[in-house]
Amino acid sequence: MSRKIADYYQGILRQLGSESIILDLVNLPDDFTVSALYANTGKNEAFNNLKSLLEQTDKFVFIVPEYNGSYPGVLKAFIDGLPYPNSFSNKKAALVGLSSNMQGATIALSHLNDVFSYLGMNTLAMRVKLGQIRAHYSDNVISNALYKELLEIQAGQIIHF
């Protein structure tokens, strides 16, 4: 669902006249935690390519699924593999949470916001929480009018942030 919502959000950004790219963590090398981090920093070309995309960007939209009450470990591992403190310092982010429950990844977004605050990233106050997302999304259409409106408002905010 994260990629589907990322594609949907990218469509909103495009309608607002803002181009974007999607950095999908599914493209991380399977072994990146041992081949690209810590003692192996800089040695994994595939990881370096994703890191390079991130380094060239100063605004982000994180589409974050809830996983075991927080955000996925692969996202934390990716963040941990980036150069500290400059990867996110003074950059800007919007946060969108997805969940199959009613909460829309509220706790996950809070945890991630804490990490970004520590790293010096500025996050929009408006966090979009898409609870029970599978019931409200089908064939690149979000059927929940409030969800659509919140995503559109937030997209406008991140463009002007």
Image (cartoon, rainbow, N blue to C red):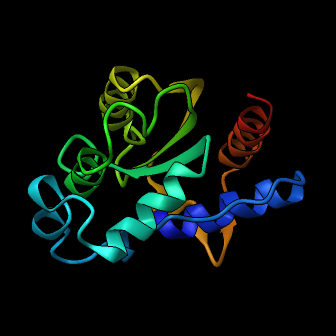
> Who's the residue at 88% across and 51% down the image?
16
Residue 34: x and y in percent read 9, 66
> Total marks drawn?
0
65 lies left or right of 22: left
Q: Position of residue 52 (x, y in %)?
A: 48, 60
Q: Position of residue 79 (x, y in %)?
A: 31, 46
Q: At 59% from the left edge and 52% from the top edge, which residue is drawn?
A: 56
Q: Nearer the viewer, residue 116 or 148?
A: 116
Q: Residue at x 54, y 25 (%)?
A: 90
Foreground: 83 or 138? 83
Place of residue 59 in the rendered image (x, y in percent of width and height, measured from the top left): 63, 41
- Report if residue 82 is visible in the image: yes
| Residue 84 placement: quadrant | top left
Q: Is 25 located above or below residue 94 in the figure? A: below
Name above or below for residue 8 compared with residue 154. Answer: below
* Quarter of the image with the C terminus in it: top right
1 left or right, relative to 160: left
Image quarter for residue 100? bottom left
Q: Is residue 42 left or right of residue 1?
A: left
Residue drawn 53% across and 23% down? Answer: 122
